[in-house]
Amino acid sequence: MNDTSRTILLQANGLCKDYPVRQGIIPHTVGSIKAVEDVNFALYKGETLGLVGESGSGKSTVGRLLVGLEAPTAGQVLLNGQPLGLQRPRGRGNQGTRLQMVFQDTFSSLNPRKRVGDILTAPMRYHRLVTPKTAWREACRLLEMVGLPAAAYERYPHEFSGGQRQRIGLARALSLKPELIICDEPVSALDVSIQAQILNLIRDLQQEMGLTYLFIGHGLAAVHYVSHRIAVMYLGRIVEIAPAQALFTMPAHPYTKALCDAAPVADPALRGRERTVLAGEIPSSIQPPTGCQFHPRCPHAQALCARVQPQLLPCASLPPDHLTACHFAEALLGKGREDAV
Amino acid sequence: MMRYILKRVLIAIPVLIGITMLDYLIMSLAGSPLSMMTGPRVSQAALEARAVQLGLNQPWILQYFTWLGQLLQGNWGYSIRTYQPVLTMISANLGPTLLLMGTSMALGFVIAIPVGVYSATHQYAKGDYAAVTLSFLGTSIPSFFLALILVYVFTVRLGWLPSGGMVTLGGGGGDALDVARHMVMPTLVLTASLAGSNIRYIRSSMLEILRQDYLRTAKAKGIGRYLIINKHAMRNALLPIITVAGMELPMLIGGAVIVEQVFSWPGLGQLTMSAIMSRDYPVIMGVSLLSAVMVVVGNLVTDILYAVVDPTIQLK
Amino acid sequence: MAQPMVLTAGRESRGYFGTVARRFMRHRLGMVSLCFLTVLVLLALFAPLLTPYEPNKLVGKFSEPPSLQHLLGTDQVGRDVLTRLLYATRISLLVGFAATGIATAVGVVLGLVSGYFGGWVDMIIMRFTDMVMSFPYILLVLVAAAIFKPGLWNIILILGFVDWPGVARLVRGNVLSLRETAFVKADIVAGMPTRHTLFSEILPNTIAPILVYATSVVAISILDEAALSFLGMGVQPPTASLGNMLNGAQSLTVLTSKPWLWAPPGVMIVLLVLSINFIGDALRDAVDSRNIR
């Protein structure tokens, strides 16, 4: 895959989101949580970008900023080169429905008082994508597409299992013919056996319909399975972004390496491999560390790391689509190669 | 803790001001107290002079701030009808009401706690059904109707109890036993409705608690039923009891208007009724203020007791 | 492509309200009360067809004890007590349901607005709610009744405007928790208008608790109307209301020697309120989510 032949669908430029922290007898703002800090990335048409990180890394916030569930403190999002109104989706006019979302919580994502058919058809009817007459047929087509029988139309959400509910959630997202679907940890709440089915469905739908996904997750395995490229977030920043395979085989950022090493590998021969194990807790994002945010937990940290924030840049020894935010990425990569020899 | 209390008090002040302002507005809509004074012997000029003297010719908001200013200096105003200071009138009537309501509320809890707990721990047993049905009856019967029935039975038919008042008029009355005899029926009426609603409240919160997992654990450990209910469940059931008590606190002041009326009990309720009938602003304002303060204090005490009983509640 | 999967076969798909109705019917006391209340409502509605007398016409001697002609006797001015009782029940039911309708409408709108929009709108509405709730209830009703000329529609309005804060708080609390659910988020993402979110997503999920609460408001309104009319500040004669029929019993001669004048309306209030409360209790059990399914 080379970048030049592909068109950029969505571009995030310098996205930031602060939450004020209020305290005191007369509540006043005493500080802010920087949930998302200067996040930049591009999404190409037809690809899946995975977004991984620990809880509190800001990955879900990025998703909510894109669909407009929250307004960013700074930055902008371009969709097909056009800036997206970053207020609520309703302020976005007809651009609004081009981004849809699949939610993590399969139980609260479907209104328990409405039939599945009504859940699916209400947005289509409001946006005049269907007439009252064709709504039923269209809903059945969507249900079939996600592997549910048309009979599901008449049923209520509580009659379905978690996996089936997530299929309905996908159908709802598809109903508005979006250009980009943001999957916010869509399989985290499901049984492992069901997870694979949903992941396969997500991949199949992409192939059939040429969909673009932003796939948010905290399990590296799931993200790796569906993603073409992966971005790793730590404390509100993207620390590394690379093609999925390259990220695993050649992690350039110490944090990414730690994440890869933490993932269990089903091969006893690799039991003795050298692993980067993280010490300590993820720091508070009210008072993030100075310089590189990862330096207090980084095994390779040096004096420079505590002072200067590293930029997300390509490495000389890696392909140009592999970006990392580490002062010593080059040196560490070299060391890794020497070790391997 | 002090900070928390301070914060709550600070929040309560605007609410109190709002309530009293609303009181004043509604009352001024109700009409001038002078309209009750008109008669053949009162001249128009005298009425106008009186209106100026009382400040009634001013807009209500100015009247309100005059009243508030006086209040802050400790002056609750004077009754338009009797010319007595409002504070004196209220304190004269407060005692009987507190005696009546205090006794009824205490009795309400004394009855409701054991019955409610029994009912919850014996859910769907005969005793439970009886308790629930009786508690519904207690809240469904209008107090004045129950009062009439009691008067009919105990005064008219049996002649055991006096039908109204607080002491027997003319010689012999006035001792504690006499007052107690006068109190029996009004207390019964008030207790019936209070106990009725308390039983249901305690029963449902106790049921809620008994469903919790930690009680199942306690049961599984083989701790006896008695210990479970008394040591583990009761402590948590205290919270809802405190809530009800806090909510009922304001009723100490305003809860007995109708009962006092029916039994001619010389309390705040009677005072309020006659003040409303004669548009006696200063007296109505005094009573409203008192009950508003009770509401705020009730909420505050509830919150603080909550924090004392439940260590997981953080005071922020 | 995944295969179409088999849905849990068997029982017919039932909506939430179907489930609630089925569970309500299992509540014996609730069902008995519902039937009883239905009969009362029918009796009150068809009162003109059921009784040969007019409620406000003098049809007999003063204070006649019950007889075959006048099953519950006549009152102090010679009107048929049974006829008046039926018409009074009509009034009580009207007051109860109309006042509850007003309280619920006001409470639902304010609660929805307050909970959904939050911020200063919420702040103002909630402080106002606090104030109305901090007002000693009976005092508010009495003062209001003293302001406006006592009368049927004024009583309904007063009771309606006194009872809304409970509904508003209930709805607000529900909205606050529903606002965070993913299905509301999905609605926003789908670009649906606010009114759709409020009335089509959030409101159907609050109807059950509102309904339970509303039954208690009906009961309370009936009781309050009776108390006000008993004190002479409610529905005014000659219109019969259960409360003002009891008014006469304040005189000792009536209380002592003419029980047919005051016992029937009193018993009627108790039965009305009791059956409504039982229905409310059964509803509460029926909508309790822990019992569902």
Image (spheres, coloured by chain):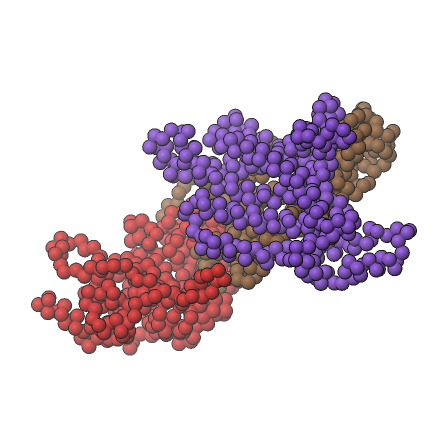
Chain colours: A red, B purple, C brown
Q: Is residue C36 left or right of residue B48?
A: left
Residue A74: quarter of image = bottom left
Q: How many marks?
A: 0
Q: Residue furthest right?
A: B40
Is residue A318 shown above or below A209?
A: below
> Is B102 left or right of A45, judged from the image as shown?
right
Choose between A58 and B42: the one closer to the eye: B42
Residue A216 position (above or below residue B221): below
- Relative placement, left or right, of A117 versus C46 is left
The percent position of residue B11, horizontal first and vertical second, equals 55, 57
* Left or right of B278 in this view: A88: left
Foreground pick, C32 / B146: B146
Q: How far across and how far down the image is residue B268, in percent?
A: 69, 43
User: Splitting the image into 4 quarters, where does residue C276 fall?
Assistant: top right
Residue at screen point 21% across, 68% down = A301
Identity of the residue drawn at 48% across and 66% down: A88
Q: Does residue B218 appear anywhere in the picture? A: yes
Residue A94 seen from this side: no
Asked if B90 appears above or below A299 in the picture, the reply is above
Q: Quadrant of the C terminus of chain C?
A: top left
Q: Quadrant of the N terminus of chain C?
A: bottom left
Is residue A175 placed above or below C236 in the rendered structure? below
* Residue C104 percent coordinates (x, y): 62, 49
Which residue sits at x=36%, y=64%? A286
Q: Residue furthest left?
A: A341
Where in the figure is residue A217, as x and y percent of width and height? 32, 59
Image point (77%, 60%), residue name: B55
